[in-house]
Image (cartoon, helix red, strand yellow):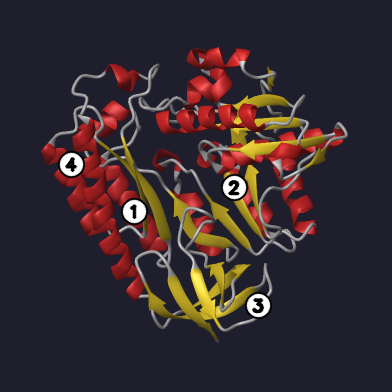
Amino acid sequence: MKAHVISLGCPKNLCDSEVIMGNLVSLGYTLTPKQKEADVIVINTCSFLKFAREESILTINKAIKAKKKGAKVYIAGCLPKLKNNLALSHKIDGIIDSVDIFNPHTPHVKATNPWTAYVKISEGCNNNCSYCLIPAIRGNLILKETKDILKEVETLAKKGVKEIIFVAQDTTAHKEFIKILERTAKIQGIRWIRIMYTHPAHISVQLIKTIAKEPKICKYIDLPMQHICDKILKKMKRGVSSLYMKRLIKKLRDAIPDIIIRTSFIVGFPGETKSEFKKLVEFIRKTKFERIGVFEYSREEGTPAAKLRGQVPGKVRKERFHELMTLQNQISKELNNQLIGKIFDVLIEKKCKNFCIGRSYMDAPEIDGSVKIYNANLKLGEFVRGKIIKASAYDLVACLT
């Protein structure tokens, strides 16, 4: 019997997909990358935003139409947990209600490159941001035991993993996150530790010190800020103020001069005026973040923000999105040009005809840029020293040193 797993959405979902694949293998299935060969197809869905739900439903419908005769289609993840998507139940063969990431004996099948692994340290979220469906979909925060997290990392290291990327709805909500980072840094074979999905309210002075002092922790932090105007932040229920976040950025940059801050902002949130958007633009122009993701506000049924007055028209949201992305393109190009002549460790991930592609500590897989090295015969998963010789807005070119 063959099984095919499709993982949609973020790296947190990918961690669940790895568990799903592990369970299928333990039941005697052979995994296949070819959907038409599969006796069982599992689609791990995403429902965070409207376009993600649309992608999930489209993928399910395609799988149902393309499956071989007698094959069964199951869905997992976020989509089954939304009541308004129960209409799917007559089209599919079943639902995987939950994925047990907390059982240390649950088998995993890695879905990433051999040298990189995502490690999920908690499930659910207690932040209750007004625009977010996650608490409704994933429930309240449940922490994974520290000893189980470290055991997972040790197992991955023995299999050749060099980069550990910690993920969760809010990694910094784990009460022993600093301990996890410090213990992970002592595990032989681990070269990079990357921190994703933090919350500004939970960045402590001790965490900043830990990132600064530990060489294995990438000087990189994923810090979604969402806005900079106090009125909007309050409506979003972010639990932080504009002043707090400006001071936090200064603390990070003072303590860790080479830190790369990846953040995200939502434009067109209910009640966002022209003046407030301009404040956001000027804040980004002045602060010059190394990495930014911009999202148009999505009115999600069931969230408090969906009921707010002052919903911003779609055309305006789109215009604001493009304005911020254009600005960030200019900032990124400026910052990347300043890297020319500097030398970085580069993790090689892809070999092409005349060049290899890798990443520096400044880039998380899939979402950030890359480093190209021409005329070099390098091994996948190898770390090399590269001197930056050319830069664009998002990618770099280096030569070996």
Between marks 4 and 2, how big is the CA–CA gap?
32 Å
- Looking at marks 3 and 4 on the same chain, the residue that comes earlier in the sequence is marked by 4
Q: From this view, report whether residue 156 is shown above or below residue 268.
A: below
Between marks 1 and 2, how big is the CA–CA gap?
21 Å
Between marks 1 and 3, how big is the CA–CA gap?
37 Å
Q: Which of 96 and 291 is in front in this view?
A: 96
Between marks 3 and 4, how big is the CA–CA gap?
46 Å
**Numbered disc in front, either 2 or 3:** 3
Badge 1 amino acid: Ile
**Numbered disc in front, either 4 or 2:** 4
Q: Nearer the viewer, residue 133 or 261?
A: 133
Q: Mark 3 points at which residue?
A: 378
**Numbered disc in front, either 3 or 4:** 3
- Number of labels in the image equals 4
Q: In which quarter of the image is the C terminus?
A: bottom right
Q: What element carries label 4?
A: helix
- Looking at marks 4 and 1 on the same chain, the residue that comes earlier in the sequence is marked by 1
Residue 266 appearing in the image: yes
Q: From this view, report whether residue 365 is shown above or below residue 307.
A: below
Q: Is mark 1 on a helix, strand or loop?
A: helix
Q: Name the residue under label 4.
A: 277
Viewed as shown, does residue 65 lie left or right of 211? right
Tell me the number on the disc at residue 249: 1
Residue sitting at 77 percent across and 46 percent down?
Answer: 151
